[in-house]
């Protein structure tokens, strides 16, 4: 359809919105051709997460190692295309590691990211998943996102009892509240002790 629209109006510019990553992978050769022709201004690929564990729980139908190379290839064949995504923060069982991997990948591979806080809805499969991410953890994660919003190349390190150190050129320290020191247990998996 996009090719026919382009043939009908060669000056027309288009945005592909809500392109499911599993569909992009399945039909990559077709999308590759469309994206390389230069009439697409932006593409929204809502990955939701780049944690393979969370992607499996979400039944997304793809893995991090499949989608990130596609994003790199889009950059190579059409560097002018603005790549946008959506990510969920606080999906049940999300660890600090899951969150940081997704945040770093979002900053590295996308021009714009919209973050959505997960909220339970009865009747949805994820409603049954445990443990839930606490409101304190969600608040900390959203604060981190505010700090690094639009900052490519940021890297994150949790300093026990001191907060997050965010490296964007030079380190930036983001303190955590007194109740947040319980964010990680001895195993470092981001789950409360």
Image (spheres, rainbow, N blue to C red):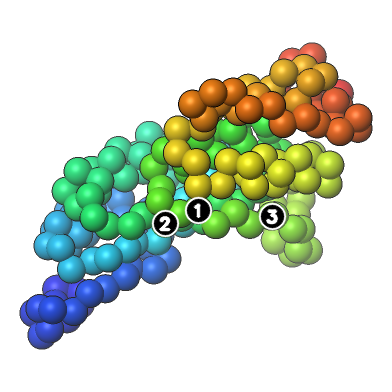
Crowd class of label 1 (few under 14; some 14 to 19; many from 20; radius 10 Å): many
Crowd class of label 3 (few under 14; some 14 to 19; many from 20; radius 10 Å): some
Which residue corresponds to the image point at 39% horizontal and 68% vertical from the top-left?
A: 17
Q: Earlier in the sequence, mark 2 or mark 1?
A: 2
Q: Position of residue 19 (x, y in %)?
A: 38, 63
Q: Does residue 191 appear left or right of residue 41 in this picture?
A: right
Q: Residue furthest right?
A: 178
Between residue 92 and residue 151, name the one nearer to us. Answer: 151
Q: Position of residue 23 (x, y in %)?
A: 34, 58
Q: Residue furthest front?
A: 170
List the residue tagged with mark 3: 117
Q: Which mark is residue 175?
A: none
Vertical placement of residue 57 versus 13, above or below: above
List the residue tagged with mark 1: 113
Q: CA distance from mark 2 to mark 3?
A: 17 Å
Q: Does residue 59 appear left or right of residue 138 in this picture?
A: left
List the residue tagged with mark 2: 84
Q: Position of residue 154 (x, y in %)?
A: 51, 32
Between residue 102 and residue 170, name the one nearer to us. Answer: 170
Crowd class of label 2 (few under 14; some 14 to 19; many from 20; radius 10 Å): many
Q: Residue furthest top?
A: 186
Query: From where the camera sits, is residue 22 visible?
Result: yes
Quarter-of-image position of residue 73: top left
- Mark 1 or mark 3, which is nearer to you? 1
Q: Does residue 11 appear left or right of residue 75 in this picture?
A: left
């Amino acid at each position: 359809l996009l090719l026919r629209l382009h043939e009908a109006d060669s000056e027309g510019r288009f945005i592909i919105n809500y392109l499911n990553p599993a569909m992009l992978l399945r039909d990559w050769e077709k999308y590759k051709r469309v994206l390389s022709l230069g009439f697409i201004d932006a593409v929204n690929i809502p990955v939701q997460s780049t944690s393979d564990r969370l992607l499996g729980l979400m039944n997304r139908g793809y893995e991090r190692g499949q989608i990130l190379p596609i994003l790199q290839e889009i950059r190579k064949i059409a560097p002018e295309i603005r790549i946008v995504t959506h990510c969920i923060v606080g999906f049940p069982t999300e660890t600090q590691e899951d969150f940081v991997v997704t945040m770093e990948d979002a900053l590295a591979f996308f021009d714009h990211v919209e973050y959505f806080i997960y909220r339970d809805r009865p009747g949805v499969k994820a409603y049954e998943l445990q443990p839930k991410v606490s409101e304190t953890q969600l608040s900390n994660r959203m604060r981190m996102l505010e700090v690094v919003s639009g900052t490519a190349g940021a890297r994150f390190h949790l300093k026990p009892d001191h907060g997050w150190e965010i490296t964007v050129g030079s380190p930036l320290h983001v303190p955590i509240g007194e109740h947040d020191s319980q964010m990680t247990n001895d195993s470092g998996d981001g789950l409360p002790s």
